[in-house]
Image: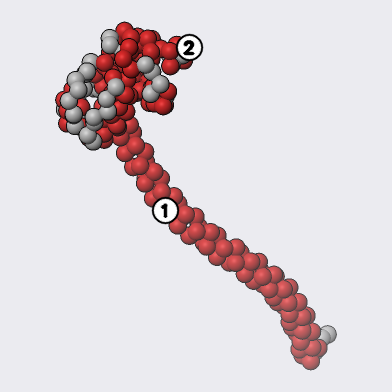
Amino acid sequence: MIDDNEKDLLKIINLEKKVTDLTNELKEKTELLEISNGKLKKIQKDYDRCLDWTKKLSDGYDHYKYRYKKLIKTLNQTVQEKEKIESKLLNQSDTMKNYIDCSSYINLISDRYTRLQLISLPTLRTRQEFERQMRNIIKLDNIDNLGTFKQLLQCVWNYRGNDVFTIEDLKKRYGFDNVPRTTMNRYINLLIEVEIIKRICQGHFQVLF
């Protein structure tokens, strides 16, 4: 029969075993906790990095959204300007269109300014003679539109007066009263060249600019 001392000893042994088991379990739990803490720190680090990238992406999105709106505004303005220009081109008068067609031929004539001085001036008494002399200077192979070329020659020959004239006279003579200033100045300069050439052909050079 077990006495009280043996019972107490058994209790102590059992308690020591439980303490040992609990200590071992606590040790295992502590190791798991340390591992979990390490993982948690890594997760926290990754989370902080994600927050940083999210902020950068948000800032970048706002920046590009602003640039996108700015580009759209610029594009719309460009389209509007293009439509305005196209509208102006469509509304050009027939007279302006004719002068635009003639501008390249005017340049061709002015490029041959020095050769024109060699023409026998007394023979240029009619428009037909003037046109014949011009054809001799400008090869017909280089003329894309002979009708436009003849129209230019008619324009040059129309005024045969010997009086001195001004830019205002040119404006009225060639119908530039309602033409925008920048366009008018460009064509006035071309027409002045034509008038100088014609005056040389006619044997006098009395032009005031």
Q: In the image, which is nearer the foreground, mark 2 or mark 1?
A: 2
Q: Position of residue 167 (x, y in %)?
A: 20, 32
Check the image and name the residue furthest to the bottom. 5
Which quadrant holds residue 176? top left
Q: Position of residue 116 (x, y in %)?
A: 39, 22
What is the C-alpha distance between the residues marked 2 and 1?
62 Å
User: Circle 1: is it few (<14), some (14-19), or many (20+) Cα within 10 Å?
Assistant: few
Q: Is residue 51 above or below residue 11?
A: above
Q: Position of residue 153 (x, y in %)?
A: 31, 14
Which quadrant holds residue 196? top left
Check the image and name the residue furthest to the right. 1
Judging from the image, what secondary structure is the residue with disc 2 in? helix
> Label 2 belongs to which residue?
141
Q: Is residue 13 above or below residue 33?
A: below
- Three-letter code, disc 2: Asp
Judging from the image, what secondary structure is the residue with disc 1 in? helix
Relative to residue 196, is residue 16 drawn left or right?
right
User: Circle 2: is it few (<14), some (14-19), or many (20+) Cα within 10 Å?
Assistant: few
Q: Which mark is residue 62?
A: 1
Residue for point 77% across, 84% down: 16
Residue for point 67% across, 70% down: 38
